[in-house]
Structures are given as structure tokens and as C-alpha cells.
Image (spheres, rainbow, N blue to C red):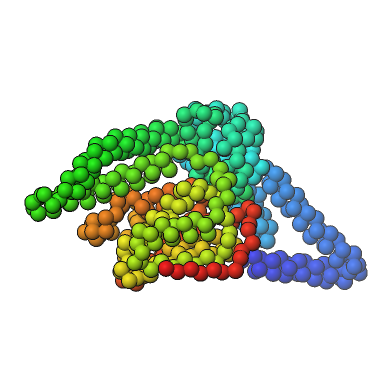
Amino acid sequence: MNSGVGWLRAVRLATLFLSLALGLGLIIGYPAEAVAITAVALLGYSLYQLRRLHHWLQHPEEETPDAMGVWGGVFDRMHAVQRENREAQGRLRSSVSYLRDSLGSMRDAAIMVDRDGFIQWSNKAAERLLGLRYPQDGGQALLNLVRMPDFKRYFLGGDFSSPAVVHPEAGEERQFEVEISRFGDGDRLVFVRDVTARARLEQTRRDFVANVSHELRTPLTVIMGYLSTILSQSDELSPRFTKALQQMDQQASRMEALLKDLLWLSRIESVRQDPLEERVNMCGLLEELRDEIHSSHPERKLVLELATKQLVNGDYRQLHSAASNLVQNALKYSAPDGAVTITWQESDGQPVLTVKDEGIGIDNVHLPRLTERFYRVDDSRSTATGGTGLGLAIVKHVVASHDAELSIHSQFGRGSAFSIRFPRAESPVTAASAGNSGL
């Protein structure tokens, strides 16, 4: 029944009863008394139905009361609302049970905590990995039960954009990867997985690469020494042998550069990075790099633009390696008369290093994989330039160890720009006026 029509009918019925009471009262000579008695009767009926409604709402399991008119519509509508609520609650309970069963079957620990950090639920894997037991530990503070400094720092830091690797105890080999997601009104879902096997495998791979690279350097040095000695007496050799020996010397030099890059990359990956507290003067570093490249490539045009004297927290050797690789790449893929510009400036309060060339550019399809080790955009072109395929991989690891961001902008046929955006320094140095120098 339409609610508006139902209430209108109820008003009409009440008006009709009051009109009849008034007519009857005029006949018997007591019109006011008749109307008052009828009004009290109507009010009593409404109060009776309200009492029935109140009793039924307190005991919804009882049968829905029957009534006439508008009260019948009210009871029917309330019954429909209750049925819809029961169905919604059933679906919600089913969803929650399904979610908990799904999370409970995971090999990774899953913990639900409220906005204040108190445990609301945890699965069986949380007991195996973290010693949490549900429901015994329900309602307790998670940080009181999981006493890992790295975990506490990540949990309270609030930046959950990337997972964190934590160690259960200082010096322990085991490693956990922690991911936290927010949901609801500040609640959090914590996932913890044991990545010890993966970390051990990765360490084994790094050790293998480092050991093989180190062992290859000795025989390669011997080979290069003999080649150099023989080539120094090229006048006594047949031109056919001279050309072959020169090619061997070139490939040996390329192999030496490859081994050097592999050892350096392995060192960057293997060393657990401590907080970088050294204040690196990037202006001095870039000026030194410019002089080094000028001494080896005096014919190349290299422009250095220093728009700030901002220092960065970092490792001088790693930063020099990253900048050098970017500049060397720019020179390799630029025309001999093309300029390479190195810019050190501030953008939105953050220091930014940019290396821009006027070279052949890179198709956008290659950009996502460009920092992978040994990834080749064009094998023939990379071989011709003598690159090892590790330069940008080294840059990527240096950038990651300095909490910086690497961005690449390139237009095929019109050049590329590689930028490293460093985090805002805690103790900023006042920027000086811009200074330009060029070669």
C-alpha cells in the first residue's frame, strides 16, 4: 500500500468518526463530550498499536502482528525491512566467513588491526611466523606482541606504498617481507611472508656472479698482457695476424669492462645499505666528472649547468658511478658533434640531476625494461658502441639505495633525458646563483 494513500485514508476515517460522534452528540445534547470520547478512543487504539509495535521490535522472532488500515501497512513494511536486514546480514556474514577462510588458508601471515593498532583477527600462519594466536591475542596491541624494530618503524611510519623487509632478530638470517593495506575507518590489513629462501637464492646468485667475475679477471689480465706485448711488435707480424690480434685485444678490453661492471653491481647489491649520512657535494662531483670525460674525449661537447649548490646524503663513489654511466651512455648514443648537457638544479625543493643528449632517442616501448641488466634496445647498435649492458642497471641500484627516483624521457630520433630526483635534504643548503660551464 502506498504510504501517502494509507495515511490519507487514516485521516479520512478519523475525520469520519469524529463527524459521526459530533452528529450523535448533537442528537443527544452532548456534542463536546461525544467528540472527546471518540478522540480518546482513537488515541487509545493508536497507543495500543504502538505498544504492539514496540513489543514486536523487541521480539522480532515472534509472528508479525495483524492490523487494519495504516497500522497494517506499518507492520508489513517493518516486516519487509527486517527481512531485508536479515538477508543483508546473512550475506555479510557469508562474505566475512569467506574472506577469513581465504586468508586463513594462506601460507603468509594475515593480521587485521583497528585504527589504534589492536588485533581484531589473525590466521594460523601468523602463529607460525609471528607467534600470534587468535582469539587469545584478540584486542591486544600488535606492537606489544611483535617486537621487531624494523617492523615497528614501518608500521608507525605510515608510508605503505612499498613493502618492507624486516629481520626477526638482529643478525638473524631469516627475512620477512611486510605489506600493509588500509581499509575501512583507518583499519589495517598486515601481510607477512617469509622470504628467507628467496633472499638466500638471490644472495647465492650475487655471490656466484661476483666470484666468477673475480676469477675471470686473472686469466683475462694475462691474456691482455700477452696481446699488448705482441701488438707492440706488430711491425714484425703479418697484417692478417695483426688485424686478428687487434680484434682480440678489443674484445678482451670489452670483457674487462664487463667484469668491472659486474663486480661493481654485485657490490652495490650485496652490501646492506646503512643510513647514508655523508654529505656529497654534487657540484664538485660533476665538475670532476666533466674534467675526466674531457681528458678522454676532448673532441666532445659537454655542457655543465649548476643551478644550485645543494648537497645530498649519499655515497660519493656510487653517485659518481651513476652520473658517469648516464653521461657515457649519452655520449655513446649521440652524434660526434652532438652536445650532452648535465644539469644540477632544484625542482619543488628537491635536487635533480639531469643528463640530456641530442642523440638517436629511444622508442617508448623499450623504456619500461631499459634498466634491466643486459637488456638491448638494438643488439647491433649496442655492440658497435662497446657497451656492457649494465650501466643503467647500476644507475637503478644507486638510485634505489639513495631513496631517489629515476625518470626517463625520450623521443625517438630527437634525444633522451635521464633525471634522478633525490629526496629533499633534511639540512638544506641555500642555493647559489646559477653557474654554467661548457666544453
The residue drawn where x is 63% and y is 57% is: 428
> Is residue 51 among what the camera can see?
yes
Is residue 131 depicted above or below 402 in this figure? Answer: above
Is residue 422 depicted above or below 154 in this figure? Answer: below
Left or right of 332? Residue 28 is right
Task: Assign the C terminus to one quadrant of the image.
Answer: bottom left
Residue 372 place in picture, x, y as percent: 34, 51
Residue 77 place in picture, x, y as percent: 62, 57
Q: Nearer the viewer, residue 63 or 371?
A: 371
> Is residue 68 among what the camera can see?
no
Query: How many circles with numbers are drawn on the protein?
Result: 0
Left or right of 155? Residue 52 is right
Q: Nearer the viewer, residue 171 or 222?
A: 222
Task: Assign the N terminus to one quadrant of the image.
Answer: bottom right
The residue drawn where x is 73% and y is 48% is: 54
Residue 403 place in picture, x, y as percent: 51, 50
Left or right of 384? Residue 53 is right
Left or right of 334? Residue 91 is right
Residue 164 place in picture, x, y as percent: 51, 42
The residue drawn where x is 45% and y is 34% is: 194
Q: Nearer the viewer, residue 49 or 246?
A: 246
The residue drawn where x is 43% and y is 43% is: 268
Q: Nearer the viewer, residue 57 or 134?
A: 134
